Image: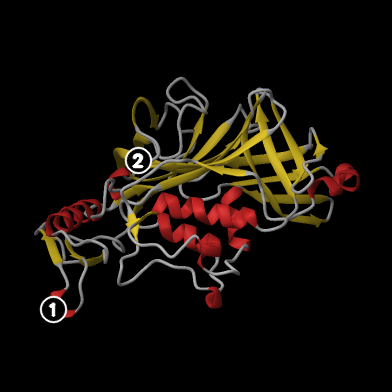
Amino acid sequence: MSTRVLTQHALTGEWLSQALPLDKLEYGPELSGPGSLTGLLAPKLIAQNLSAVDPGNTFIYVETDDQITWGGLIWDVRPKGSSLSLEAASWSSYLQRRHDLHGRLDGRGPYTYADRCQVIRDIWAYAQSVTDGNLGVVVDTTTSASTVGTPSDPYTFNAWETPNLGERMDDLVSGSATPDYTCTAEWNTDGTAVVKRIRLGWPRLGARRTDISFVSGVNVVEDPEITLGADNYAQVVVASGAGDGSAKRRQTSAVRDGRLRMEHVLDLPDIRANDVLAARAAAERTARQRLGTVDQVVVRDTPAAPIGSWQVGDDIYTRIYNPWTTYTGWCRITGWTVRPDAPGGPQATVQLKPADLYQYGGTS
């Protein structure tokens, strides 16, 4: 695996470094988030390279085997002792530093029964229309059946509240059955420029994979922690839907399982159909009736799951064994970071969540 790091001026497009010498490089994407990159500059290279890592004004890319595999913005550079640490995050992190100063995204809103994907595109269009605010990010044309806003309660951006654009984008993808997104970067067709992209997924990003797996003793190189916690456990789930007061819709899914009763309320104010509420309550209860989970695994590059063979959002069958307990089940990849120079060869730290925590489809 041949890896190099490049940096570029965010406004002028000037290439600042074609091979930034970063040690301890670790980078990767995230489900509905920006992902991250960290690394260290060698002491003798600090002075000559500091201008190539200007925080808040520099794009940084990782190229692996002649293909751009990650891109983002440098946000934090810290000289300390004989080293300089660097932190970066991908494109959606920029929206956390931007606000709607015009209101209604400068005439694009307010929104009634609007596709969340379209609102996300409008947020980016507004952010990049303002002077010195254009990253050159392209947002997918994906459409969804997940909507926001009603005639009595439009989804809007009030200028006097100076809404944070990053927080609004997070809000649009944070509920049940909402679109997914991830940030990507790749060379254009002639390899002269980087295409910066927000990939939107509906009803999801990724797929259930039967061709690869994460298994102790096969490709999992460390003994991961299996979390046995009751904080999120519940065998009684109440799904609360649209309406107010006594007219508020509500469906309950409950079982007796020989354990102390635990309850959870699922707030779904946009859902009006009782059958949809009942299905959500049942799915949530099933997901919460679990004590053992695996939050992350460290895997090496093997035929069982070659690094680069999975995508953000994929469901991977995971089998973990330790002296105390075992875990087997489908886990959804919510992000990962790659360490190209890990001892013994490239490794990836993969963040996971139980796949049945996610529900896909419309919300009407």
**Residue type marked 1:** Ser
Q: Position of residue 164 (x, y in %)?
A: 55, 66
Q: Position of residue 309 (x, y in %)?
A: 47, 26
- Residue lying at 56% horizontally and 72% vertically, measured from the top left: 162
Q: In the rendered image of this protein, does residue 311 appear above or below residue 38?
A: above
Q: Residues within 10 Å of mark 1 (few under 14, many from 20)?
A: few
Q: Nearer the viewer, mark 1 or mark 2?
A: 1
In front: 45, or 311? 311
Q: Residues within 10 Å of mark 2 (few under 14, many from 20)?
A: many
- Residue hosting label 2: 331
Q: Is residue 151 left or right of residue 18?
A: left
- Residue hosting label 1: 246
Q: Is residue 85 left or right of residue 328?
A: right
User: Looking at the image, is mark 1 or mark 2 earlier in the sequence?
Assistant: 1
- Residue lying at 42% horizontally and 41% vertically, measured from the top left: 142
Label ID, residue 72: none
- Residue lying at 33% horizontally and 56% vertically, measured from the top left: 147
Q: Position of residue 86 (x, y in %)?
A: 72, 50
**Residue type marked 2:** Cys
Q: Quadrant of residue 280?
A: bottom left
Q: Secondary structure at mark 1?
A: helix
Q: Position of residue 329 (x, y in %)?
A: 29, 38
Q: In the rendered image of this protein, does residue 183 appear above or below residue 212?
A: below
Q: Secondary structure at mark 2?
A: strand
- Residue lying at 28% horizontally and 61% vertically, measured from the top left: 230
